[in-house]
Image (tube, grey):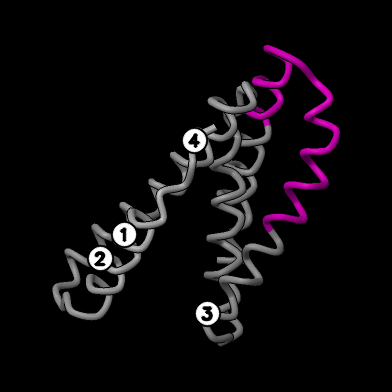
Amino acid sequence: MKRINLFFIVLIALVLTYTGLKVENEYYLGVAVLLLIHSINASAMNILLGYTGIISMGQAAFSGIGAYTSAILSVNYGINPIVTLFAAALVSFVIAYLVGFPILKLNGHYLAMATLGLGMIVYIFMNEMDFLT
């Protein structure tokens, strides 16, 4: 197993802090935010497929659940967006645990199809529940 390079982590944290505090162009901030979101998703795929060998196609569903939870809580209920990030992570974790526990008992193609089906169910749910958004 590789050792964690602490210097690299500190360097990335400093660059991100600089980007968040000094860059005033909204386009560049939007690109930086999307870069971070995609790097989190890529890290999750690396853990799932690279280290454990689990073929999952439904991890975007949990990202969407967290995003919708945060957006609904902050826009409709006026809760501080920082607080909604933690609430979104908690809601996404609870749903992932409840749904993932039986799905992870599957193997191979059945696991891949179940996770793909879960992603499609969440996608349809988010499109049809227009009274929430």
Residue depicted at x 30% and y 73%:
17
| Residues at discs 2 and 1 in contact (Cβ within 8 Å) | yes
**Alpha carbon separation for disc pair 1 and 3:** 22 Å
| Residue 126 lies within the magenta run | no
Magenta residues, start to end: 92-117
Say which label, 4 or 3, has the lower sequence index.
4
What amino acid is found at the position of numbered circle 1 in the picture? Ile
| Residue 96 lies within the magenta run | yes
* Secondary-structure class at tag 3: helix
Say which label, 4 or 1, has the lower sequence index.
4
What amino acid is found at the position of numbered circle 2 in the picture? Val
Give the residue at mark 1.
12
Say which label, 2 or 4, has the lower sequence index.
4
Front residue of this view, candidates 56 and 6 = 6
Give the residue at mark 4.
2
Image quadrant in which you'd find residue 27: bottom left
What amino acid is found at the position of numbered circle 3 in the picture? Ile
Front residue of this view, candidates 106 and 118 = 106
Give the residue at mark 2.
15
Q: Position of residue 12 (x, y in %)?
A: 31, 59
**Alpha carbon separation for disc pair 3 and 2:** 21 Å
Residue depth check, mark 2 versus mark 4: number of the one nearer the observer: 4
